[in-house]
Image: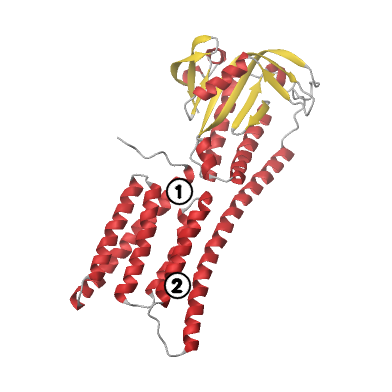
Amino acid sequence: MNTAPALTGSEKHLLTQLHQTSRLLLACLALQLPFGLWHVLQGPSFALLNILIHIAVILMVVKLCTRQQFYTARQWMLAGFMSFVTLATVIWQQPGIPYFLLLGAVTCGFFFRRKEVKSQRMWAAAFALMFIVLNLQGFTTSSGLELAVHVSNTITLACASLLILYTLDIHSKRRWLHLLASQRQMHERLQQLLPPVACSPAQRTSAGETFPIDSCAVLFADMAGYKSLTTTLDDEDIVCVLNALYQRFDQRAQLMGICRIKTNGDEYMAALSGAFTACENPHCDVAEDMLCYARQISQDFHQVASEFSIGVELRIGIALGPVRGGMIGLQRPAFDIWGRTVNLASLLEQLSPPGLITACPQFYEALSASKSQVTGVRGVALPDGPGYALQFTT
């Protein structure tokens, strides 16, 4: 049985708008039925036929929406609305009917993603052009001035509708920029409130120096569905989402003495060891604190995903074991860690189902209070041979 591909968060939002609009149009067409029946008594039943056909079209749009076939539903609704107004204008011969096409020119922008600007503008231009054609067809007058005023007003209204749509697009972009500015402001305020990190690994390591760390919890986190997200959002929007996300992750890490190692696109890497936190938190429980951190950043992720309406999930992998840390390279060296434990954490993150935390057995054994919260065990092929990983709820 074929199923429609999963929709992203922005597509789900647009689908909801489309579904609600189609039901509103269905109610409006139902109210037109008495006028169609009255028209039957006056002669041919073209008006009633137009209404019944487009009721069937909108019913199909509603059905497509329930099946989450967003793109097909959108095409049918926009085409159906335009054809209904066009035929109603020809049948009823009323001068006010074409003005509904201007409503279509403005509102069609609410059914397109930001990356679909070309398609959006093509539909808006089609609505505006059809309005001009219908509003000018059949207009006859003996006064040249009256005709000129009518043509001028028609073209002006069509252009004004397109300008309103453009203004709404600009407003939407500014909203994203406002969200980004708000995130930066919140970050700056928290930085003023949070105490500075007294002894981070980078401050205590010289360029070119490496050293062994006997026990270190390494965490990798990334977005399941990030690739599809990059096709629905602009680069600027992606950066805005990642910035909001990483600011929250970093704030959590700073509060708990966890070291943010690096980021790579949507991948976030952090580590926790007594070697990092001995001077700040001598009672650090590496495994418990890292599990607590993983659950907290999962909550932060869902808040950011809801705020930006993105339909992706977070997956997390954690491994515990020896690593080697230090700073290598010549240009802008930064503290980093290497070793089998790092590779294992990266693998567990890739194997982790969206919305869960997948950890190695050593990490589980090191837990003191959270062992009872394990939700499942499944076998995986670990780098050193057959092994198993455990999954935690977030």
Q: Is residue 114 left or right of residue 187?
A: left
Could you say where residue 165 lies in the image, as x and y percent from the top left? 52, 62
The answer to which of marks 1 and 2 sits earlier in the sequence is: 1
Q: Which amino acid lies under the numbered mark 1 shown in the image of this protein?
A: His
Asked whether disc 1 touches disc 2, contact meaning CB atoms under 8 Å apart, the reply is no
Q: Residue furthest top?
A: 385
Mark 1 and mark 2: Cα distance apart in space: 32 Å
Seen at 57% across and 20% down, the residue is 345
Visible in this render: residue 319?
no
Q: Nearer the viewer, residue 129 or 247?
A: 129
Q: Quadrant of the N terminus?
A: top left
**Is residue 245 positioned above or below 214 on the image?**
below
Could you say where residue 175 lies in the image, as x and y percent from the top left? 59, 53
Question: Mark number for residue 13?
Answer: 1
Q: Residue furthest bottom?
A: 142
Q: Nearer the viewer, residue 234 or 203?
A: 234
Q: Callout 1: helix, strand or loop?
A: helix
Visible in this render: residue 49?
yes
According to the picture, the residue beneath numbered tag 2 turns out to be: 132
Q: Is residue 132 left or right of residue 219?
A: left
